Image (cartoon, rainbow, N blue to C red):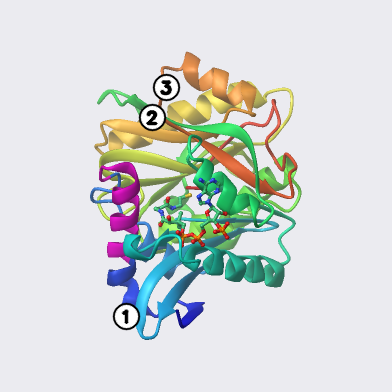
Amino acid sequence: MDLDVRALDAADLGVADEIVRDAFGTFLGTDTFGDTDLLRTRFRAAHTTVLGAYAGSDLVGSTVVTRWGDVGWLGPLSVTPKLWDAGVGSRLLTATLDVFRDWGVSHQGLFTFAHSPRHHGLYQKFGFWPRFLTAIMSRPVAPFESPSGFLGSAWTDRAALRAACAAVTGAVHPGLDVGGEVDAVLDQSLGDVVLVGEPEAPAGFAVGHTGAGTEAGTGVAFVKFAAVAPGPHARGTFERLLLACGGWAAAAGAQRLVVGVSTARHDAYRHLLGAGFRTDTPGVTMHRPNTAGYDHPDVLVLDDWR
Ligand SMILES: CC(C)(COP(=O)(O)OP(=O)(O)OC[C@H]1O[C@@H](n2cnc3c(N)ncnc32)[C@H](O)[C@@H]1OP(=O)(O)O)[C@@H](O)C(=O)NCCC(=O)NCCS
């Protein structure tokens, strides 16, 4: 096959989206995307690169590569089902590693199916190794949950907001920076940033999507990333942050609050269970190199790298 892997052409976003839905739908036997949008929203963001695999002029697969400071992760990776096992996914992964190398990210990873030896084999070929389960969890949102904390959309100084969030993530894991996610939700009106602690120096924050056309979907508020700075009051801050996320979700009219957490972050996982969250989908994260990154028992971070 004459295959070329390059930056996805904006004109091919619709086809790329169809392939993502077809590929995952074929593998899982069900549609998991509904009215969410991952590809277009990520394509528009400045901290991502979307790669397309072209057979001649036909798009046959794609992947998103995301940069969170010194941390890089990939997905969703998809190949049109009729071309599975012909090396297209591997070519997309080779190109992804080039992007990681150019960015100079020190820790790399992805989220995949915990039960699929095929997926583990594919990614292991490229130096990603399975570590802990990551749980996609949710709880119902009650309409009476009240807003607390404060919202990033109210900040007039975006640079200051990004810096405040980077101060939290940098204290968790040097170089971790999700400023691109902050910009994406605010610039594209995908949701908001929920912050707790001192307005000048927040102790924790969450970047959330809500509604159709975002990564959440109708009726859902999805915390794409959340972090609390380490310290003696971190657990209390985490509790307040989760409550504030519930209040934000209720104000947005969501019926479910969805989060992801590595079970290696034992305190966070246990806290979520105690707060009424239940696992809907367990997956596994694979890391390159095979080190913990920011997956430590006392790290209060929510994300899932989907
Ligand atoms: C996953 C997916 C992207 C792979 O694309 P692909 O083009 O079929 O992948 P490739 O042909 O490049 O690679 C196949 C590799 O899988 C691995 N593999 C396949 N079957 C395997 C098995 N039974 N055990 C272990 N490894 C296996 C091998 O490493 C193989 O590479 P090799 O032939 O060089 O040894 C594609 O199947 C897809 O779109 N699936 C649905 C969506 C999805 O699951 N996305 C990834 C979510 S994390």
Residue pointed to by mark 3: 277
Structural distance between the alpha carbons of marks 1 and 3: 40 Å
**Magenta-tinted stretch:** 17-31
Q: Earlier in the sequence, mark 1 or mark 2?
A: 1
Q: Quadrant of residue 293?
A: top right
Residue located beneath label 1 in the image: 11
Please name the residue shown 37% across and 71% down the image: 60
In depth, the one of 170 and 40 nearer the eye is 40
Q: Which mark is residue 246?
A: 2
Q: Position of residue 232 (x, y in %)?
A: 73, 23
Residue 127 point in image, percent of width and height = 69, 53
Instruction: For marks 2 and 3, give the CA distance.
Output: 12 Å
Q: Residue at x 65, y 57 (%)?
A: 126
Mark 1, Cα crowd under 10 Å, few <14 / some 14-19 / many 20+, is few
**Secondary structure of the residue carrying numbered label 1:** helix
| Mark 3: few/some/many CA within 10 Å (<14, 14-19, 20+) | some
